[in-house]
Image (spheres, rainbow, N blue to C red):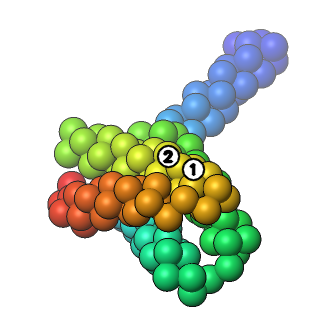
């Protein structure tokens, strides 16, 4: 085997090793899925707390709006992170899909609530809080894969 062939062989071997390492490392664990689920649940709780506090005039409109915008941003980040995950089992894939759906629903609720807070429409915030409560209940019922 010539030096050129040895070099090509070595480079191909390293390339395969790198690809294998990347493929294996992109698999998601149940723990990682659970962590993202907890983040989504935590931001939903924050949305609920802020919405209820704002309705009672317990927090300023500016603070409520800023917090809801932050929740929206963080739920978007969670959705992007969840989308990148590659579950190993069908059960994990199903769990991932449900968590992703809840993160997207939470983001939409946060957008609508933020807009309603900015427009000082308490009735619209109450509607979103009811949707949020229903979504949070579903999220909490999810069983781990």
Q: Quadrant of residue 93?
A: top left
Q: Is residue 34 left or right of residue 80?
A: left
> For the residues marked 2 and 1, what is the alpha-carbon distance in whole angstroms?
5 Å
The one of 18 and 64 positioned closer to us in this rendering: 64
Residue 19 drawn at (x, y percent): 58, 32
Q: Quadrant of the N terminus?
A: top right
Residue positioned 61% across, 52% down in the render = 115
Whether 131 is drawn above or below 108: the answer is: below
Q: Left or right: 140 with respect to 113?
A: left
Mark 2–mark 1 CB contact (< 8 Å): yes
Q: Position of residue 67 (x, y in %)?
A: 64, 69
User: Which residue bears the numbered disc 1?
Assistant: 111
Q: Is residue 67 above or below residue 80?
A: below
Residue that appears at 26% across and 59% down: 134
Residue named by callout 2: 108
Q: Residue at x 41, y 56 (%)?
A: 128
Q: Is residue 75 visible?
A: no
Of residue 101 and residue 87, the one placed in the foreground of this image is: 101
């Amino acid at each position: 085997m010539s030096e050129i062939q040895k070099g090509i062989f070595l480079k191909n071997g390293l390339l395969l090793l790198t690809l294998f390492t990347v493929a294996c490392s992109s698999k998601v664990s149940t723990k990682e899925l659970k962590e993202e689920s907890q983040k989504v649940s935590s931001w939903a709780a924050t949305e609920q707390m802020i919405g209820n506090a704002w309705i009672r005039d317990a927090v300023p409109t500016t603070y409520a709006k800023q917090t809801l915008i932050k929740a929206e941003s963080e739920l978007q980040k969670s959705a992007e992170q969840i989308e990148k995950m590659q579950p190993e089992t069908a059960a994990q894939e199903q769990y991932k899909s449900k968590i992703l759906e809840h993160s997207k629903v939470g983001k939409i609720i946060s957008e609508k609530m933020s807009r309603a807070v900015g427009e000082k429409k308490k009735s619209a915030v109450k509607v979103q809080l009811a949707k949020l409560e229903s979504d949070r209940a579903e999220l909490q019922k999810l069983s781990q894969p």
